[in-house]
Image (cartoon, rainbow, N blue to C red):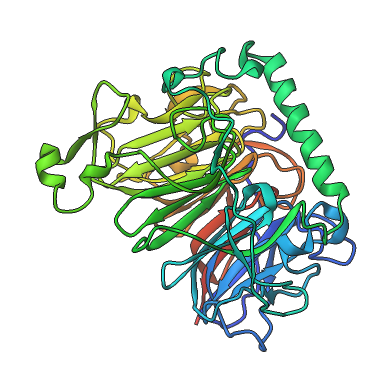
Amino acid sequence: MNGEGKKSDELKMEVVNRERVVFMWGYLPGALPQRAPLVSPVLVRIPDSIDHSWTDVCGGGCGFAMAISDSGKLITWGSTDDSGQSYVTSGKHGEIPEPFPLPTEASLVKAAAGWAHCVAVTENGEVYTWGWKECIPSGKVFGDPSTGTSLEKDVFERQNSLTEQVSPHSQSSRSSGETFSATNTKGVGEESTKRRRISSTKQSAESSSSGDETVSALPCLVALNPGVRIVTVAAGGRHTLALSDIGQVWGWGYGGEGQLGLGSRIRMVSSPHPVPCIELSSFGKDSVAACSRGSLCSEGQGFRVPGNYVKGIACGGRHSAVITDAGAVLTFGWGLYGQCGQGSTDDELSPTSVSSLLGIKIVSVAAGLWHTVCISADGDVYAFGGNQFGQLGTGGDQAETLPRLLEDPSLENSHVKVASCGARHSAIITEDGKIFCWGWNKYGQLGLGDVIDRSTPSQVTIEGCRPKNIVCGWWHTLLLAESAS
C-alpha cells in the first residue's frame, strides 16, 4: 500500500469554547462550495439557532453526515442532489447543519445510516427509519420532511413479511450452493456477479428523482412487538439491526447472504424479526434454569455460547456481528473476504461464535464493507476480513479469515476504548485520548492531510480537545470531542 509506515503531521486546530464539539473529514460533497474532499479535520459549527453543543456523532451514508445535538435533535448536513442521495435520506443538501424533521418530539439517543437508509432511536425506545424503500419495514410514514408537514398516512402492509425464503430443510449455518445459485462458484466470479447486482440496483435508485416513492420511503415508525424497547441500532448496506433493553436483537431488510441471521437466505424481511443469537427462553425469569453458569446453547452450534444477552451490535455492508455480555462475538452474513472471522470464506446464515476469540472478553465490535474490528476488555484490537486498502491495519493488504491482533508499535501500551469502520477504512480512540486511522484514503477520510492510503495505524492529533467518540461513514469520519475550557 502507498505510504505504509508514514507518520502523520500534527494537525493544530483552534477549538471554540464549547462543552462538546464535532470535527469532520473525508467525502462530504455538500460540505464545501467546491465539493472538495476534506483531507484534514474541520470543525463543524452548529448554528446557535439549533443548539449550543453536541451529544453524539452517528456517521452517515454515502456523502452526508449525522450527529445528535444536546437537546436530542438529529442534525444532518453535507449531501447534494447529484451525489446519489435522495433528499428524503440525507435531509439536508448543503454545508450548514440543520435538524432532520422527524415526526416526534422525543429526544433521540442513537442513530445510524447504511448505504442509503437511516434509522434512529428515541429516549422512549421507539425506532424511526427512512431512505431506500427496500430497507424500510411495514409501518406508518409521516408526510414529506421537505415541507415540514406531519400528515400521517398508512403504508401498504405487505402480505408476506418473509419472501424468497429457502426451504427449512436446507437451513444451515454455512453457505450452500444449492440455496442460492449465484454462490456456486467462489472467488472473482461470485464477487463480479454480486457487484453487478448491487450496481444495477444502485444505478436504478440513483437515476430516480428524490420524490419517487417507489425508491425512497419517508420516515416510518417501526412497528415492534408490545413492550419492546430499543436502546441502539446499526445499519448495513441494505439491512438493519436493533438491540432491545433486555439484550434481544431484531432485524429487517435484505438478508440474501445471511446478514439477518435467520438461518436461511431470506432475501427480504419486511417486518422486524428476532434474530436467534441466544435462545429466547434465556430472557427473563427462566434464564438461570435454562442454562447454568451464564452459558447458553446457540441453535445450530455444537458448543455453548458464553453470555446471557447481547450487549452490542454492528452491521457491515452485507454481514453482521454481535457481542454478548460475557464478551463472546457472533458473526453472520457474507463471508467472501473472511469478514465473519470463521477461518473460511463461507457465508454464515446463523449467528456463529468466533471460536478463536473465545477466552478473550470482547467489549466492542465494528463492521465495515468487507471487514470487522473488535476491542477486548484489555484494550487490544483484533481485525479480520478484507484488506485491499489496508483497512485491517496489519501493515499489508492480505485478507484475514481469522481475527488478528494488531501489534503495531504505535499502539504499544495503548488501551483502545472506541473503534469504528467505514466502507474501507478504520478508526480508533485510545483511553489516553489518541486518535488513529488507517485504510482507504482516496477522499481524505483518514484526516491526515493527504489522500495516501495507510495500512498501519496513523495518528491524527487535534489540539485543545479530548476525543469522546469516533464514527466512520462510508467515505468520511466524524469525531465527537470535549473542548478545552
Query: Where the N terminus falls, by quadrant?
Result: top right
Residue 325 at x, y percent in the picture: 27, 47
- Relative side of 80 to 148, left or right: right
Q: Residue at x 73, y 50 (%)?
A: 444
Q: Nearer the viewer, residue 62 or 361?
A: 62
**Rendering quarter of residue 412:** top left
Please tell me whether residue 412 is drawn above or below residue 479 in the rendered image: above
Q: Nearer the viewer, residue 280 or 411?
A: 280
Residue 476 seen? no
- Relative side of 148 to 233, left or right: right
Q: Residue at x 76, y 42 (%)?
A: 442
Residue 432 at x, y percent in the picture: 41, 58
Residue 225 at x, y percent in the picture: 39, 58
Residue 433 at x, y percent in the picture: 46, 60
Q: Residue at x 83, y 42 (%)?
A: 204
- Relative side of 482 to 93, left or right: left
Q: Nearer the viewer, residue 139 or 401?
A: 139
